[in-house]
Image (cartoon, rainbow, N blue to C red):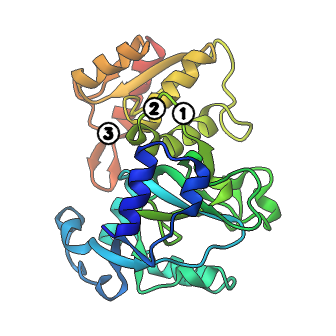
Amino acid sequence: MSTEIEAIRSAILEGASGEDLAGLPLPLAFRGAVVRADEQEMFAGVPSDDKDPRTSVHIDDIELPELAPDEVFLAVMASSINFNTVWTSIFEPLPTFQFLSRLGKESVWGARHDQPFHVIGSDAAGVVLRVGSAVRLWKPGDAVTVHCNYVDDQDPSSHDDAMLATNQRIWGFESNYGGLAEIALVKANQLMPKPAHLTWEEAAVNGLTNSTSYRMIVSPNGSQMTQGQTVLIWGASGGIGAYAVQYVLNGGGTPVGVVSSPERAALLRDLGCDAVIDRKAEGYRFWSDEQTQDQGEWRRFGKKIFTR
């Protein structure tokens, strides 16, 4: 850890003001978890289950990029691993460097992302260190959590639903300088205030899971759940599923949670979800093999749902 990063982290933990944080020097480089372009073929011919991220992910020193007008530098206090990170680490379904190359062709600012390394991570919580010249609503010292929707504000299709935009990206997966680093490069529109009651670790997973659940359950382009509806939630004890359960309960609906163990069923009941299906206890086998769904088993599952 560089002396600048040590000073920044100590100041944050000691409750330094935003003015004090803005006055601390930024490092010329920072540590980050990366995959490397010259290794993207390292798993060629290897079955997915045998691809080991411990051989593909490295901790490297990364030069601090220039800050665009609509971005902030974030001192990362916590991050997490999600499916984007796993895919990036094993170069599936595609190596992410082609995404970075495409972004690099869009503009001068996009070119910063096209590097022989990819700083990965689509989740983060931390403290704003610097803001770009066009950032209005955030300032150094703000504690934030990051959602991973990397939106092009010049794309009209993003104005109704950014997830359906023609140029929508996932931060840290289709862009560089993600959350698994000491400093992250984040668009200002990705920031949300850190919930005061959450730890840094809890807040780090709040952005992706909470915003995704809200979009799927509540938003105009989601299911638009209304009072009294019964909502089936697959993987209801996971990150997105647990938020979905709470949105359904708070919206006056009845969640039916599907899980895969008695322990997960108990977690759901603690959340207030009384209708729980443990698919392993019921012996469901939804796939005859890796390519073929068992339609009879899905029909059996459907009858289970509608007769509860």
Marked residue nearer the N-terminal end (3 or 2): 2
- Tag 2–tag 1 contact (CB < 8 Å): yes
The residue tagged 1 is: 195
Asked if 17 appears above or below 291 in the picture, the reply is above
The quarter of the displayed image where residue 36 is located: bottom left
Q: Residue at x 31, y 76 (%)?
A: 60
Displayed quadrant of residue 168: bottom right
Distance from Cα at disc 3 to Cα at disc 2: 37 Å
Measured from the top left, where is residue 85 in percent x and y? 38, 60
Give the residue at mark 2. Answer: 198
Residue 113: x, y in percent? Answer: 54, 79
* Amino acid type, label 2: Leu
Amino acid type, label 1: Pro
Q: Tag 1's secondary structure?
A: loop
Within 10 angstroms of label 3, few (less than 14), some, or many (20 or more) residues?
some
Residue at x 70%, y 36% (from the top left corner)? 219
Instruction: Classify the position of the C terminus by image quarter.
Output: top left
**Residue at 57%, 24% in the rendered image:** 247
Q: Nearer the viewer, residue 282 or 227?
A: 227
